[in-house]
Amino acid sequence: MTDLKEIQLKQYQPCTELQDYVQTIWLVKNDKNRQELNFKILSDCGSGLILNFGDDVVYHTKNKRLISHKESTTLGPSTDLITITFNNNVHCFGIRFFPATGHHFLDFSMEKMKGCLLTTDEKHFKKSTALYQKVMTLLTKGANNKEVIIAIESHLLDILKTNQTKRQTLLIDMLLAVNNNEVTDVNQLCNTFDISMRNLQRLFKTYLGITAKAYIRISKIRSIKTTIANDQFDSLAQLSNDNDYFDQAHFNREFKSFMEETPKRYYQLKRQQ
């Protein structure tokens, strides 16, 4: 695994008006890099954009591959692990929406955006070319990171003001309950929030693009991944038992289906960093 220090990752909390919609605006930069840097990222089912001002960036998922030159890339909601490869000069700004808030900014439904990995255009993100050119102009003039972030925020606020879609508070509360491990299956989710299975699936499909069952599964794996990375467990067998897997083999299969490696291998890789 490549160390994040190689790309000097910086994350910025968005302005107050965007904090309910945008998780983070981030920056990676290393103009001295002369090698291939690979990063594997397990999605949280949110969507986002990456504006590339460096050399080519390659995005690769289970079924898709995209090479980004100096342009913007849109990443739709997905349960697939994504590998991002930076080649030589690294310089990108990224926008990461919360799960269930991407529809406020993207003109396609989240169902249609599921698993998308494509070059950003005006069809699904308003004035995408204008945003890229504006940031490029600022960078050419020597603008600092704060000035660029303000320009990105301004663009997002303009979209938000003209978009009439409502904030899906019920769905957001459901996602929070899942993330906090307050509910662990779709039936419990329906009972807790007094919603029919049909309406539950409709909400997830329309505004998240991912089924409720898939979201619950990936949320659990993300939590386990953090526990392993932080070495906060006694044994993998106990970790499997604590998270209600049938047995160690079931745990290994589930973890590998999302992470493309076993829990043991992931732990070994993290220890090598």
Image (cartoon, rainbow, N blue to C red):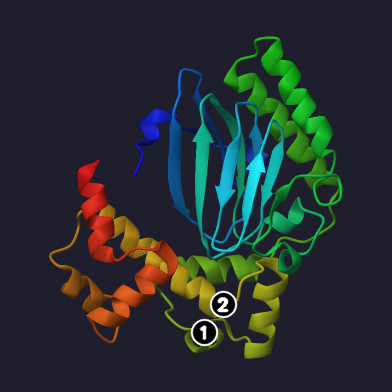
Please state which amino acid type lies under the numbered disc 1. Answer: Val
- Where residue 53 sits, quadrant-wise, is top right
Image quadrant containing the N terminus: top left
- Where residue 153 sits, quadrant-wise, is top right
Q: In the image, is 265 to the left or to the right of 106?
A: left
Residue at (71, 38) in percent of width and height? 72
* Label at residue 256: none
Tell me whether circle 2 and circle 1 mark residues in contact (CB < 8 Å): yes
Front residue (pair 40, 139): 40
Q: Earlier in the sequence, mark 2 or mark 1?
A: 1
Give the number of marks. Answer: 2
Q: Is residue 265 above or below residue 139?
A: below
Q: Position of residue 126 (x, y in %)?
A: 84, 44
* Label at residue 186: 1
Report the residue marked by disc 2: 212
Residue 49 at least partly seen: no
Front residue (pair 89, 199): 89
Q: Is residue 133 above or below residue 165?
A: above
Q: In the image, is 141 to the left or to the right of 86?
A: right
Please state which amino acid type lies under the numbered disc 2. Answer: Ala
Q: Position of residue 154 (x, y in %)?
A: 75, 32
**Dot 1: element:** helix
Q: Position of residue 152 (x, y in %)?
A: 70, 32
Label 2, residues with CA under 10 Å away: few <14, some 14-19, many ≥20: many
Residue at (64, 82) in percent of width and height? 200
Residue 157 at least partly seen: yes
Q: In the image, is 245 to the left or to the right of 192?
A: left
- Where residue 108 sits, quadrant-wise, is bottom right
Residue at (79, 26) in percent of width and height? 133
Residue at (39, 35) in percent of width and height? 4
